[in-house]
Amino acid sequence: MEIEVTNDELVRIRKNKREIEERFRDLKGLERTLRVLKLRFLVEQREKVEKRLNEMRQNYRELLEFEEKAKRDKEFLMAFGKELSEENKRLRKELEEKNNENNR
């Protein structure tokens, strides 16, 4: 088993070395220490999960915004394409009429 500690915690551990050694000799002290370590581990895991959940929520919000923007862009492009098509039909008709007049 590996235990990670901060520099401040390491200084406190060294300072309280005798007390810690006595705790480890004492079964109840060992059990308390294990409970504290387990609790710390669980708190750290919960914080990591909460952080990841918040990131996922943010990513989901961004995805929804992107989806809405893509929908609006598609609608705009469809309308623009329709206008271009109508303009193209009108110009073809005018060109045909001019060609017909020139051929007479």
Image (cartoon, helix red, strand yellow):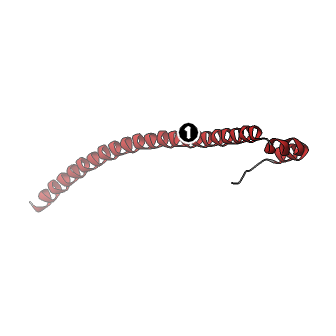
Observer-nearest of 89 and 1: 1
Name the residue: 42% across, 42% down. Answer: 69
Left or right: where 61 falls relative to 5: left
Residue drawn where x is 25% and y is 48% of the image: 87
Closer to us: 90 or 85? 85
- The one of 29 and 87 positioned closer to us in this rendering: 29
Residue at disc 1, secondary structure: helix
Residue 68 is left or right of residue 1, and the answer is: left
Quarter holding the N terminus is bottom right
Q: Which is nearer the eye, 56 or 26?
A: 26
Q: Residue furthest bottom?
A: 103
Type of residue at label 1? Asn
Give the residue at mark 1: 54
Position in image of residue 62 (x %, y %): 49, 42
Q: How many marks?
A: 1
Give coordinates of residue 91: x percent, y percent.
23, 52
**Which x, y percent locates residue 5?**
77, 48
Mark 1: few/some/many CA within 10 Å (<14, 14-19, 20+): few
Indicate left or right for 92 with 18 as reference: left
Which residue appears at 74% of the width and 37% of the height?
A: 28
The residue furthest left is 104
